[in-house]
Image (tube, rainbow, N blue to C red):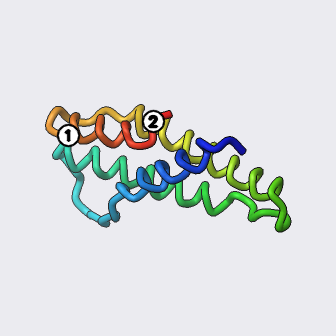
Amino acid sequence: MRPARGAQILAMALLLGACGGSEDRAEPMLDPAEAFRSALSAECQNVRFDRDAVAAPTGPTARALAVYLEANLEVERAYRRRIAALRPPPALADEHAALLEVGRE
């Protein structure tokens, strides 16, 4: 495992920390900012499921840990690609750009 991997994993954890909670709403969301936040929240939930699906290390070896961390890193990369594909309303464009800068490789 390269030394930079630890920094990348830490940066991805910070990125995930930006995920907000979800709110159940019966009425349709017409506000673009709310719609964007809802899409972001859904992606956060998806990455939690994806991360939970990664198998635990198979043993107490450096190789097993490296395989586990690499699998988690790939989940985070896929999450970053999906977040980057979201198109925020103009009022949230700067925040979206800042979110994408967290942990940039």
Cα separation, mark 2 vs mark 1, equals 19 Å
Dot 2 amino acid type: Arg
Q: Residue 79: percent from the left, percent from the top?
A: 51, 44
Q: Residue 43: percent from the left, percent from the top?
A: 45, 50
Tell which of 29 and 23 is nearer to you. Answer: 23
Which label was assigned to residue 92? 1
Question: Against 94, is 11 above or below?
Answer: below
Picture quadrant of residue 94: top left
Looking at this view, name the residue that lies furthest to the front: 3
In the picture provided, is 31 more to the left or to the right than 17?
left
Q: If the image is split into quadrants, where does the N terminus sit?
A: top right
Dot 1 amino acid type: Leu
Tell which of 47 and 14 is nearer to you. Answer: 14
Count neighbours of disc 2 (C-alpha within 10 A) and say few if under 14, some if 14 to 19, many if 20 or more: few
Q: Which residue is mark 2?
A: 104
Q: Residue 23: percent from the left, percent from the top?
A: 30, 65
In the picture provided, is 53 more to the left or to the right than 27?
right
Disc 2, SS? loop
- The mark that comes first in sequence, 2 or 1, is 1
Give the residue drawn at x 49%, y 49%. 12
Give the residue drawn at x 34%, y 63%. 22
Q: Are marks 2 and 1 in contact (CB under 8 Å)?
A: no
Picture quadrant of residue 95: top left
